[in-house]
Image (cartoon, grey):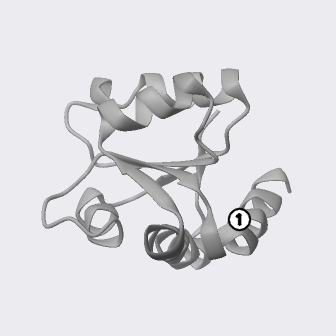
């Protein structure tokens, strides 16, 4: 199940991606995200809600749930791409090594369980 992030947590999700990009390792794009989930190396997955057609990222929440990886949805692929450090919109991002974002990811995951 994909968890739609409440407004107050959206910035934390983007921040977690930015911190993980700087201090850990992330994978950008739906193909890369799918690969790291399947390998079992993804720690946290973020997908954009405004991906068109939605079938592009539709398999990711199911795959994430199967592998026990937290998966959240954010409203904008443009902002997701910007947080991941690319100049183009991206449909999904996976954090592979949290780096210093570990606490942020834990906080977001805990809020998802509420």
Q: Is the residue 39 above or below the residue 108 in the image? A: above
Residue 57 appears left or right of 40: left
Residue plotted at (56% across, 25% down): 39
Q: Position of residue 5 (x, y in %)?
A: 58, 60
Residue 12 appears left or right of 59: right
Q: Is the residue 14 above or below the residue 49 in the image? A: below
Q: Position of residue 52 (x, y in %)?
A: 20, 37
Residue plotted at (52% across, 74% down): 23
Q: Quadrant of the C terminus?
A: bottom right
Local secondary structure at mark 1? helix
Query: Observer-nearest residue: 98 or 49?
Result: 98
Residue plotted at (49% across, 33% down): 36
Q: Residue furthest left?
A: 87
**Residue holding disc 1:** 108
**Residue 23, can we see it?**
yes
**Residue 48, can we see it?**
no
Disc 1: CA contacts within 10 A as few (<14), some (14-19) or many (>=20): some
Q: Quadrant of the N terminus?
A: top right
Q: Is the residue 43 above or below the residue 13 in the image? A: above
Count of numbered badges drawn on the protein = 1
Q: Position of residue 19 (x, y in %)?
A: 51, 76
Query: Observer-nearest residue: 22 or 6?
Result: 22
Residue plotted at (27% across, 70% down): 85
């Amino acid at each position: 199940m994909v968890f739609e992030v409440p407004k107050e947590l959206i910035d934390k999700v983007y921040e977690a991606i930015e911190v993980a990009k700087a201090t850990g390792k992330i994978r950008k794009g739906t193909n890369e995200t799918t690969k790291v989930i399947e390998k079992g190396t993804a720690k946290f997955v973020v997908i954009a809600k405004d991906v068109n057609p939605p079938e592009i990222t539709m398999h990711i929440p199911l795959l994430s749930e199967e592998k026990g990886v937290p998966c959240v949805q954010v409203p904008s692929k443009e902002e997701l791409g910007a947080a991941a450090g690319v100049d183009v919109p991206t449909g999904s991002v996976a954090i592979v090594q949290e780096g210093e974002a570990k606490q942020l990811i834990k906080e977001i995951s805990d809020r998802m369980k509420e």
